[in-house]
Amino acid sequence: MTLDEIFKEIQKSESIVILTHESPDGDAVGSSLAMKLALESLGKKPDVIIPEYAEIFKFLPGTKDIKESSDVKNYDLAISLDCATLKRLMGSEYFENAKRTIVIDHHGSNNMFGDFNYVNPVSPACCEILAGIFDYYNINITKEIGSCLLTGIITDTGGFKYPATTAETFEFTAELLRKGVNVSDIYRRVLQTVSRAHFELAKKVMDRMEILENGKVTFSYIDKNDEQEVGAKPGDHEGLVELGRDIDGVEVSIFIRQKEDGSDDYKVSLRSTEYVNVSDVCLMFGGGGHPRAAGALVSGTIEEVKKKLLKEIKKVL
Ligand code: 5GP
Ligand code: MN
């Protein structure tokens, strides 16, 4: 299916649902809301279903319409954004029951689970892919759509600092700035400002940080007890994995977070700086992501999970 055929598919669909990945980040929420606004400009009334997302994104246009679930069983069209697999998709039942499905993503580990898959692994953000698609469809990128797209671009490029950042990223941002999008306000809200709970978690993560493998690997963790203690809300753990990565000489930062109280399941986050492909490492555990940022779910005690990860990381260090 080409982009033109997708456009026809959108036009003939009465009911459309927009879905994204669990633990939604700025690119997930931003691309969902941008797609919603863009489809509305075409006269559509899509549903955006995101059961849970961080408070920091509440300033974005359209968040008041975000639904936790829907009564519609069989949507004409389901669009998955910024999500590599059906397993990670929130509201995957709406996707599975939809008559037609479209996947738009930038994860190299995407397993092409839609009827149509538009996946560009070299794009720094799903939002940047959408900017190109909207342009192709002659959809006017308003200040509102631009604010949503920029949110995803800023969060997924770490504020324009990751190597995946392109000349187009800067050109598009400059265009938005000319349109009146408040770039520095969005930057501060989604990247710079942290909640008090995040700050308290960061202190624990730093305090527990182990520096291993001659300073090339760091390891730290939080459990549910820590999150309860500081009153953590969804999204408050975002970015904690970067505390280890930013130390001079570190190639891989490992951060693990207990999934549920008392459980032996840990959500693993890996980051690398120069050469280790952490997406490949995570694929060994059934996860995935990008070469420099990836995740997986691993079972065991904290020590066991650490050992399993270190064994694989040592091979590629
Ligand atoms: P984070 O460490 O911030 O949770 O995730 C980093 C990157 O890896 C994101 O692009 C995210 O979508 C991806 N990722 C995280 N966890 C998983 C997982 O369990 N499976 C897959 N396929 N990708 C993941
Ligand atoms: Mn993304």
Image: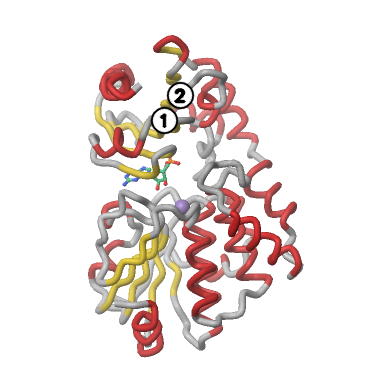
Q: Position of residue 38 (x, y in %)?
A: 53, 77
Q: Position of residue 92 (x, y in %)?
A: 29, 62
How many other residues sit within 10 Å of disc 2, few (<14), some (14-19) or many (≥20)?
many
15 relative to 133, above or below: below
Q: Position of residue 220 (x, y in %)?
A: 45, 21
C-beta proximity under 8 Å, tags 1 and 2: yes
Q: Is residue 209 left or right of residue 104?
A: right
Task: Look at 69% across and 65% down and name the residue there.
Answer: 176
The kind of secondary structure element at disc 2 is loop
Return the residue nearer the eye: 155 or 238.
155
Disc number at residue 129?
none
Q: Which residue is mark 1?
A: 275
Disc number at residue 251?
2
Task: Look at 43% across and 28% down and name the residue there.
Answer: 255
Return the residue nearer the eye: 55 or 253.
253
Q: Quadrant of the C terminus?
A: top left
The kind of secondary structure element at disc 1 is loop
Q: Position of residue 73 (x, y in %)?
A: 28, 75
Ligand 1 has an atom within 8 Å of the beta carbon of the residue at disc 1: no
278 relative to 214, above or below: below
